[in-house]
Amino acid sequence: MSAIKYELIKKSSDCDARLGKITTPHGEIETPIFMPVGTRATVKAMTPEEVKDLGAQIILSNTYHLYLKPGHDLVEEAGGLHKFMNWHGPILTDSGGFQVFSLGELRKIKEEGVEFRSHIDGSKHFISPEKAIEIQNSLGSDIMMCFDECVSYPAEYEYTKQSMERTTRWAQRCKDYHKNWDNQGLFGIVQGGMYKDLREQSVKDLLEMDFSGYAVGGLSVGEPMEIMNEVLDYTVPLLPENKPRYLMGVGSPDYLFEAVIRGIDMADCVLPTRIARNGTAMTSQGKVVIRNAKYSRDFSPLDPECDCYACKNYTKAYIRHLFNVDEILALRLTTIHNLRFLIKLMENIRTAIKEDRLMEYKEVFYKNYGYIQD
């Protein structure tokens, strides 16, 4: 038995986008989908019930952070992550690889795994592929990720090759260690930097291991969008049609569009909630930096086309005032809006795929948002 099943419902007639459905132990997910990030078992400033009401079908939590605090043993004792945080839908946990490797000088990579010092208190820790699976087994997520190395951009060919090959060996170790396939799926992560032959080799090796789904990692790490698109162009078609395809760390509207039209089913990013807390709203007319003085007497909603709680009840002037006096409600309202904006965008994208007009919808959206197209 497999915990994760993917059904391909429809392919777009004007690009490689696809409409699908992922079945998990905690419910079904319509794809393409954007996943809000609940790093430490919470989407910042939101209750799980509010996140669900926004239309979120699945959330992502972070293995590295939950391992450090409160500890995966405690979460397991509480009945697993779903019960601990009162989220009853599907959960995806990343392996912690990106966080560990972003520690820079605080970590040391070995074949066995990664030795690192906590960013919280400097304490020493070690995560191996087996440990990453052990932690995620304890958390009880529906979809787990293999432990991998995410190289920086740019990176030399030889180092990227060594890193990709090590990631492949780690993926096999993750698969060998994971036993609970009936209740938790496991995704392999394609690495290889910006090098076509390395990406192709990574896909080939991972397909032989037959994972529940496949993620494209190592993108959105500082490379220009053109390079990301190029990597997706030659990588995604190599992935199986009967498994979910996940692009890690992407959350701006243009990146989501570009990913979907190349056949990606799932994406996640902290971007919408992070910029919300800094006072930036994504709207159908482009970004709104709500702290700007021009909104001080603007009594219209953040986005007149948005159906979220913030837009139906509050004005730009009021939300700007909340930011200026450091009220917590400001962060909540912009977070509610940004998450609903992206979830609604993906709903519209699914409808456009169904009606064979995705590229037309993209053109209209880009024009209104202010993106410049070639």
Image (cartoon, rainbow, N blue to C red):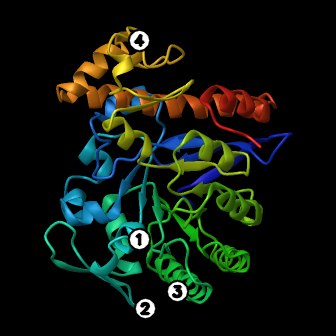
* Residue 312 - label: 4
Judge depth for marks 3 and 4 and give the one in front. Answer: 4
The residue under label 3 is: 166
Q: Earlier in the sequence, mark 2 or mark 3?
A: 2
Across and down, in percent, residue 48 comes to 32, 35
Q: Earlier in the sequence, mark 2 or mark 1?
A: 1
Q: Secondary structure at mark 2?
A: loop
Q: Are marks 2 and 3 in contact (CB under 8 Å)?
A: yes
Residue type, mark 2 in image: Glu
Q: State how far apart marks 4 and 1 are (Cα).
A: 40 Å
Q: Secondary structure at mark 4?
A: helix
Q: Earlier in the sequence, mark 4 or mark 2?
A: 2
The residue under label 1 is: 97
Q: Earlier in the sequence, mark 3 or mark 4?
A: 3
Rate crowding at label 4 as few (under 14), some (14 to 19) or many (20 or more) other CA atoms within 10 Å.
Answer: some
Q: State how far apart marks 4 and 2 are (Cα).
A: 53 Å
Residue type, mark 3 in image: Arg
Across and down, in percent, residue 268 comes to 49, 49
